[in-house]
Structures are given as structure tokens and as C-alpha cells.
């Protein structure tokens, strides 16, 4: 696909997305443009892109680590997002690992789908296996860093786990400080097989102090309550904190008390993370996140923070979540 213009649209808020962007640019280094999206931006951006015939003309479009949504396929027939993208671009490839029960519809409209199909594989690992398996450089290690960050394994390579945790903290810091140029520098270092760790050391010192302060505030905003018949924990979390890491920490400490843990990440992240509590939890994470046009996998999910509500404290957040729950299930 290198002879044409390559447009790479990828989730840019976590290790999996950033590594995916770097590996795809490594595979397609020429005439490649990268667009990093937050969950909040996803729907609006893809809708606008699908109607931009000039940008898509003769372009190879790769969308990665962004959850497929049913309305991208079957809302208003040919006027929905995915058919428009396919009609206007030279080729469309969607690489993802989030839960989807309508993948046959995606293939039927002509999208080239690379999906985990229920396997515990992150998007970067899918990109490595499908595009870079013959690479003799660092592509496999980078994919493993993303894999261990997305699907924690206590028995995994400890050095790669450490690198992934450090990388996630820096990605959060760069978003928090709105340093998008530094994110692109990091992606270019990965793409060019350069020392990406040296690239992020520039930002470590500035990040560490604010991160430590945010950690100390984690337990200050916790509120226990109910959604339907489920006991839940709700908390407002500092947007500088790595979302998955801090949600896993909360689950490790509180899963024995609740069926679900819901973390609110306000500006500039604007995201709601919903994690099932214990493995036996019946809380409907996937259904709730899909109804709110978000995504999920393996009992963990999220959706864009509805900004019309007041999210300034956890008690108000619990009231808002009750309204959202009623909308989803009543």
C-alpha cells in the first residue's frame, strides 16, 4: 500500500494505540499521515472523514484500536460511516480487538477486517502478526509491551511490563499537558526503530511530581452506591492517571466489595471507565458501554463522558450514572 497516500487513524490515549501507530508507520513509511483520536473525538472525526472525498481519494485508510460500532455499519444504509469511507477511499482496513457481535456486517460492506475475534490480543500484536511478522528488528518486543499493558500477565517479561507502564504514564502526561507534538515524536521514534525510551525520558521528571500528587488523591473521591441491583464503586479520577492501570488497582483493592468499579476521568480526557468487580460479577459492562456508543472487552469497558451532567464530585456522578443506567436498561 506504500505507493499511495496512507491515512492512519488510531486511538492515541494508551500504549496499544501509540505502539500501533508507530508500527504501522514503520510498515508504511512513505506518504503516511497519522491522526490520533480520543474516545470523545471518534464519532465526530470518523463521520467528518467519511464525507471528505478529497482527503480520501486514492488513499489507503487504516483505522486501528478504535471500537467498531453497529451504527457505523447499518444506520441509514449506505449513508452510515463505514460504507461512506469504503466508497471514498481506495481501501479501508480496520484493525481492532474490542467486543463486537456484528463483524459479519463489517465484512459484508467491503471492509478489510483484522480482528482478535475473542482472543486476548491487543491491536499492536495484530498489526505485528499481519504486517510485520518478518521484521527482524524490535517490532515484536514493542507489540509484546502493548500486549502486556493491555492484558496484564504477572508471569510475563517483567522488563517489558515495566517499559509499558512507563510508556503509559508518559502518554497520559503528554495528553494532560496537551503536548501532541511530543506524542508524534514518540511515534516517529518507534516507527524509525530509534531509542524511544530516550525520547520519553525528556518528559519523565515533569510528570513524576504531578502523578504522585494524583495518586494520593485516589481514595479521597470514592463513593459506594447501587445501579439497579448491583453494588458499585464510583470515583472521580485525575486525568493525569493512566486509566487502565488505576482502574486495575481499584479492582484489586475493592472487587470483593462491589460488582462494578466506575471511574470518571474529566477534562481533558472526558472518559468513563467501567470495570467488572470480581470475575463472577454479572454487571452488564458490555451492554452498558455499547448502548453509550463506547466499547468493551473481557469485562472492562468505557464510553465518552456525557458533558451535559455535573461530574464535579462522586455523589453527583452516582446520580448521573443512575440516569444513564436507566436509559440503557429500562
Image (tube, rainbow, N blue to C red):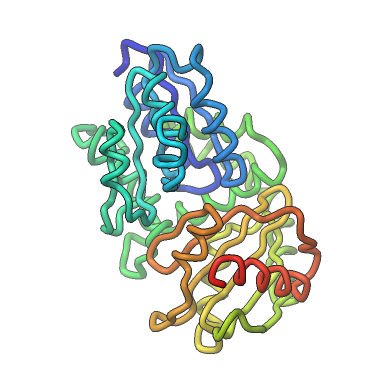
Q: Residue at x 35, y 28 (%)?
A: 92
Q: Is residue 260 above or below residue 305?
A: below
- x and y percent of residue 223 in the render? 71, 80
**Location of residue 93 (image quadrant):** top left
The residue under the point 70% across, 77% down is 222
| x 51%, y 48%: residue | 14
Measured along the vertical axis of the image, is residue 241 above or below residue 146? below
Is 49 drawn above or below residue 238 in the view shown? above
In this orientation, which residue lies closer to the viewer: 124 or 233? 233
The mark total stands at 0
Left or right position of 46 against 131:
right
Work out whether residue 156 can be spotted.
yes
Say above or below: 79 vs 178: above
Which one is nearer the viewer's eye here, 209 or 46? 46
Query: Which corner quadrant holds the N terminus?
Result: top left
Q: Which residue is pictured at 50% across the width and 12% down the height?
A: 54
Relative horizontal placement of residue 47, taking residue 120 as reference (left or right) = right
Q: Position of residue 290 (x, y in %)?
A: 48, 58
Residue 291 placement, left or right of 227? left
Q: Quadrant of the C terminus?
A: bottom right
Can residue 193 be spotted in the picture? no
Q: Residue furthest bottom?
A: 257
Can you tell which quarter of the image residue 191 is in? Answer: top left
Residue 136 pos. (x, y %): 23, 33
Where in the figure is residue 196, as x and y percent of width and height? 48, 37
Amino acid at each position: 500500500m506504500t505507493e499511495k497516500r496512507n491515512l492512519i487513524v488510531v486511538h492515541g490515549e494508551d500504549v496499544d494505540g501509540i505502539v500501533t501507530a508507530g508500527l504501522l508507520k514503520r510498515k508504511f513509511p512513505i506518504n503516511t499521515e497519522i491522526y490520533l483520536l480520543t474516545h470523545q473525538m471518534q464519532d465526530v472525526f470518523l463521520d467528518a472523514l467519511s464525507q471528505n472525498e478529497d482527503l480520501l481519494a486514492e488513499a489507503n485508510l487504516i483505522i486501528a484500536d478504535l471500537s467498531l460500532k453497529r451504527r457505523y455499519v447499518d444506520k441509514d444504509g449506505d449513508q452510515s460511516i463505514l460504507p461512506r469511507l469504503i466508497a471514498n477511499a481506495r481501501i479501508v482496513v480496520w484493525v481492532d480487538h474490542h467486543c463486537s457481535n456484528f463483524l459479519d456486517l463489517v465484512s459484508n460492506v467491503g471492509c478489510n477486517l483484522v480482528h482478535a475475534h475473542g482472543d486476548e490480543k491487543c491491536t499492536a500484536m495484530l498489526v505485528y502478526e499481519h504486517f510485520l511478522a518478518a521484521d527482524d528488528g524490535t517490532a515484536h518486543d514493542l507489540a509484546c509491551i502493548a500486549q502486556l499493558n493491555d492484558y496484564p500477565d504477572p508471569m510475563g517479561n517483567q522488563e517489558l511490563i515495566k517499559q509499558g507502564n512507563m510508556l503509559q504514564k508518559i502518554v497520559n502526561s503528554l495528553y494532560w499537558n496537551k503536548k501532541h507534538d511530543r506524542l508524534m515524536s514518540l511515534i516517529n521514534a518507534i516507527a524509525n526503530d530509534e531509542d524511544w525510551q530516550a525520547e520519553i525520558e525528556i518528559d519523565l521528571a515533569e510528570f513524576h511530581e504531578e502523578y504522585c500528587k494524583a495518586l494520593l488523591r485516589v481514595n479521597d473521591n470514592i463513593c459506594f452506591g447501587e445501579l439497579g441491583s448491583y453494588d458499585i464503586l464510583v470515583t472521580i479520577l485525575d486525568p493525569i492517571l493512566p486509566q487502565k492501570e488505576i482502574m486495575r488497582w481499584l479492582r484489586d483493592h475493592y472487587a470483593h466489595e462491589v460488582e462494578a468499579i466506575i471511574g470518571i476521568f474529566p477534562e481533558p480526557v472526558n472518559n468513563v471507565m467501567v470495570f467488572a468487580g470480581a470475575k463472577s460479577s454479572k454487571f452488564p459492562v458490555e451492554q452498558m458501554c455499547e448502548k453509550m456508543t463506547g466499547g468493551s472487552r473481557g469485562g472492562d469497558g468505557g464510553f465518552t463522558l456525557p458533558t451535559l451532567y455535573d461530574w464535579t464530585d462522586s455523589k453527583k456522578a452516582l446520580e448521573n450514572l443512575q440516569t444513564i443506567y436507566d436509559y440503557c436498561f429500562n
